[in-house]
Image (spheres, coloured by chain):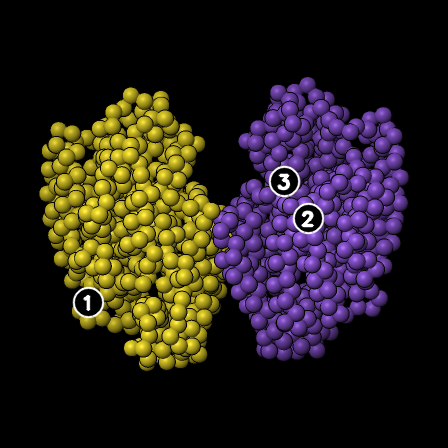
Chain colours: A yellow, B purple
Amino acid sequence: MHYSNTYTRKLVEQYREISLLNKTKALLDWDLNVNLPSKASEARAAQMAQLTALTTDRWLDTKFRLLLEKVNEQKDKLNDHEKAMMRNLNWSAKYYYHVPKELIVEFSKTTSEAFMAWQQAKKDNNFKLFLPHLSKVIKLNQLVAQHLGFTDNPYDALLDQFEQGLTTRQCKTMFDHVRRELKKLLTYIQKSKYYRESLDLVGEKHHYSLKRQRQLSQFALKKMGYDLDAGHFSESPHPFTMNIHRLDVRITTWYDRHDPRPSLMATIHEAGHALYEQGISEEYDVTPLDSGVSLGIHESQSRFWENQVGRNPVFLYFLTPVLQAFFPEQLADVHEEEITRLFNLVQPSLTRVEADEVTYNLHVALRFELEEALINNKIKPNDLSEIWKVKMKEYIGVVPTTDREGVLQDVHWSYGVFGYFPTYTLGNLYAAQFTRTMKKELPLDELLRRGDLGTVLSWLRENIYQYGSLYWPDELVQRVTGEKLNASYLIDYLNHKYRAIYT
Amino acid sequence: MHYSNTYTRKLVEQYREISLLNKTKALLDWDLNVNLPSKASEARAAQMAQLTALTTDRWLDTKFRLLLEKVNEQKDKLNDHEKAMMRNLNWSAKYYYHVPKELIVEFSKTTSEAFMAWQQAKKDNNFKLFLPHLSKVIKLNQLVAQHLGFTDNPYDALLDQFEQGLTTRQCKTMFDHVRRELKKLLTYIQKSKYYRESLDLVGEKHHYSLKRQRQLSQFALKKMGYDLDAGHFSESPHPFTMNIHRLDVRITTWYDRHDPRPSLMATIHEAGHALYEQGISEEYDVTPLDSGVSLGIHESQSRFWENQVGRNPVFLYFLTPVLQAFFPEQLADVHEEEITRLFNLVQPSLTRVEADEVTYNLHVALRFELEEALINNKIKPNDLSEIWKVKMKEYIGVVPTTDREGVLQDVHWSYGVFGYFPTYTLGNLYAAQFTRTMKKELPLDELLRRGDLGTVLSWLRENIYQYGSLYWPDELVQRVTGEKLNASYLIDYLNHKYRAIYT
């Protein structure tokens, strides 16, 4: 990395301390989800709290702030890398400099308790246990939004924490469009003669060996080019990716002994996140450019690999003999077309994480609307359980009979996280738009049909991964695709794909 | 915990920060040995270095030092817990306050490089690659010893780092006694008609399923009372225990597909360490009393469980049907007596970690003598390879043909660790002495014969574990056994046991 002055160099050196602490925190977090013995939760929470305090202290350190201001003053003289680093530092610093430390501490304490209450509430299917915590989390988020500042809507301040510059207005336009079009597509699919409520190949009466499923995942990881010498693959209650360092990007999956799809699809999804991190330019290591730029762009990569590759009929054509080799008893006589339908089953369902490509974004739309309404006091937390049911009926056409499968299903609010959900749909939009560009430059279907994922990975590294956080999402999309984010590409893609499958 | 004044309370509160950092470092260390992808070593080293620096800063922090001095001044007014905490803090602080920070940094840098050189040297069987690093490590240890201070021998200062108050003089007396007696016993055994060079039940042509071995280890852990909800059991290249917190004590083992003994014995050994940590009084959590008091006492517990329990003929009598159930093909027709001989095979061997109970301490004696001579410049590192061979011939009766199996076999020196080895033999001595007392209070053989390990664990918790670092080794041994450390108990135990097996 070339520095145009010693202040910037010093600033990045000081930031290195923050970055290293964050990497250690990431390891503790990964370990918590994979290895931590049940009795050690409190002990681990104390370790995490210490690291958070150490990080906060470093952001608030006077020398660091002065250095930051000094470099900000000479912004115009910086080179492009430095400008990007300063933009990222200022964006991250906002939280520490605008939100009072007492509020940060209260937020952290409240969400620790809220998470435990949510776990209990979900277990007992009792929303009331979670309600007071949720109300407090909403209040604190409203306060945080006030401190962070916004022009139109306090929810904007929260959205920006997860996707730089994202606004409520943009989300509204996006979700209106997506909802309208996907509702139409869903109605079409449900009328198709191929529409199925259930499938013969998976479920209770089938047994897919876990060992074979693990091997299948490992096959997929190898094909994708996930570097196990710079990563780690294991199992956890919920699949996730943890980026500890470019050379230590860990993923997990889960297993269902009655169905090989959840493990394979989760593996491909998480490996998509991981390939992004593993592909970032080495010279950005331990600088403010060293990781994926936003949640939306990150999700675009997990979803690209999961859907545009993993669920692509031409890739499933390639994968069919592999699946048959791993599960001959169940799949030896099954035709590619049936495999394609198996992996692309569309069906209104109650839970977001199990939703198909078509209904998934309807689940997200619902959450966006509820969050925006809650932050603006348009609805009351007390009414959430009922509103959830009404909206589910309206958007997806099914209604949960329990809160466990309804308003309590997602962990996000108990973590104190508001404004995160929309990035899931953003990811799907980016993925579709990137794919359209990729198809102009690569014979994607040909490559997938013969399982050549290396060429696909090279394109992504070249065009997206290497840049890490150098370009913010808007700029990245513009550079890669030549235009702004456009929801039509997702709609076109889904219509084209699913109207072919559900002829 | 009751505090007699606010200064002590404040001091322990400040120490909490050091303790939490150490726990995080312990997790990073465990992860490094179990999960770390190969390409991430440098990245991990940077995280570790940061935590070491943060810990050192806290020890050197002016407020902390002043507080420490203040409480030291009123030592006489403290209660027993406080006195023990102050004694431990002063003992730990010595290193930070006496050794200059530059030397600490150089030591850390030198040993990082020495470790890598040792790995390569061992791989290539080329002692010369390691020699310059070893020479430097010795020089730095000599410097550290000068800074720490000593009365008789610089090696005393190094010994004290691992076992409070241990001296070269004590070690000499101990090893002279042990060497003389064990040499006699070994000669006796080698003349016995039961003496065997090799065994029919294990080795190349046998296959012991790894899955079954894992289950056998899990059976042993359950029997011993190792709490998996406050621990974690997995595999690593070298078995070890990592104490992250009383409620997060992790162990690993290794597997040999041709022999079920290494995995079972390593599991029992490491679980012995873990039971000690898991049994410490809850009120000591995150204070200077919250872990095992010394390496010697720690090793006494791993060796107690491994040898006095695991290799005890009466316990093997209980274990035989279990082994037969896990490995019917290999062991169904094997008599208890043969199982006993299998687990208690005495045989001069080249490597310490594979040595039996009788020859093990001869390996340690050799290392003690070499270390003491090196630190006092009585021998030169250049001559080590040859001296090693001569001493092996003299002490154990076998001579390594390669340095890989000779002077390069142990990792310790490459870590910069001098003065550690004697604690292995100390552990064996303590274990034998504790067992003698236990036998006065418990019908140990009866209990082991029926596999009742719970009663044994209760006795150890009651008499040793709960106290954590409250009593230093000398005091603990005196309290538990009513006398000072006495090497005769180990000699008596080994003579009694092995003269019965090798009649």
Q: Residues within 10 Å of mark 1 (few under 14, many from 20)?
A: some
Q: Residue at x 64, y 31 (%)?
A: B260
C-alpha distance separating marks 3 and 2: 32 Å
Q: Nearer the viewer, residue B78 or A202?
A: A202
Of labels 2 and 1, the one closer to you: 2
Q: Chain of mark 3?
A: B
Q: Residues within 10 Å of mark 2 (few under 14, many from 20)?
A: some
Q: Which residue is mark 3?
A: B267
Q: Chain of mark 2?
A: B
Q: Which residue is mark 2?
A: B126
Tag 2: amino acid: Asn
Q: Residue at x 36, y 26 (%)?
A: A325
Label 2 and label 1 in one chain = no
Checking the image for residue A153, the label placed there is: 1
The reply to whether residue B440 is visible in this rendering is no
Q: Nearer the viewer, residue B439 or A445?
A: A445
| Image coords of residue B268 (percent x, y) | 65, 40
Q: Residue at x 36, y 63 (%)?
A: A289
Q: Residues within 10 Å of mark 3 (few under 14, many from 20)?
A: many
